[in-house]
Image (spheres, grey):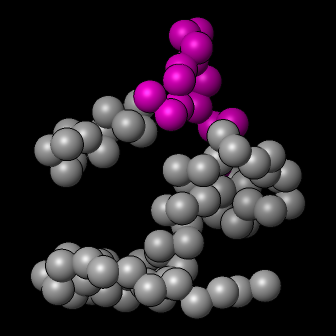
Amino acid sequence: MNTKLTLTIEKKVIETAKEYAKEKGQSLSEMVENYFKLVTVKRRQIKPEQLSPRIQRLRGIIKTDKKLNDKQILTEELSKKYGI
């Protein structure tokens, strides 16, 4: 079930996000929804069949000896990107 959400965001950010979404073949709503799914992944259990076909193909492609903390890496990279 989809529900409408109203957000207040800087105009320039919205314009840039719309351009980016168009380049990726997504709507802005899909992009925002995917971001929310990404940041809330620890709060819910994702089943493999819920992943997009592209993500299903990429899953498990990278192997490492070191245990990675995905949430910490994402937080660090977003902090670098947005200067938080």
Drawn side of residue 47 relative to residue 17, left or right: right
Quadrant in which the C terminus appears: top left
In this view, 41 is above or below 9: above
Front residue of this view, candidates 25 and 84: 84
Q: Percent position (x, y) of residue 28? A: 43, 84
Q: Percent position (x, y) of residue 21? A: 38, 81
In this view, 66 is above or below 55: above
Q: In the image, which residues are magenta?
A: 58-72
Q: How many marks overall?
A: 0
Drawn side of residue 1 relative to residue 22, left or right: right
In this view, 56 is above or below 24: above
Whether residue 38 is visible here, answered yes or no, is: yes
Q: Percent position (x, y) of residue 48? A: 83, 52
- What residue is drawn where x is 75% and y is 48%? 44
Q: Is residue 24 magenta?
A: no
Quadrant in which the N terminus appears: bottom right
Q: Is residue 70 magenta?
A: yes
In the displayed orientation, state which residue is furthest to the top: 65
- What residue is drawn where x is 52% and y is 84%? 5
Front residue of this view, candidates 72 and 49: 72
Front residue of this view, candidates 44 and 61: 44
- What residue is drawn where x is 19% and y is 50%? 82
Q: Which quarter of the picture shows residue 83? A: top left
Q: Which quarter of the picture shows residue 67? A: top right
Q: Which quarter of the picture shows residue 57? A: bottom right
- What residue is drawn where x is 55% and y is 10%? 66
| Magenta span main SS | loop
Drawn side of residue 63 relative to residue 79, left or right: right
Q: Percent position (x, y) of residue 26? A: 48, 84
Whether residue 23 is visible here, answered yes or no, is: no
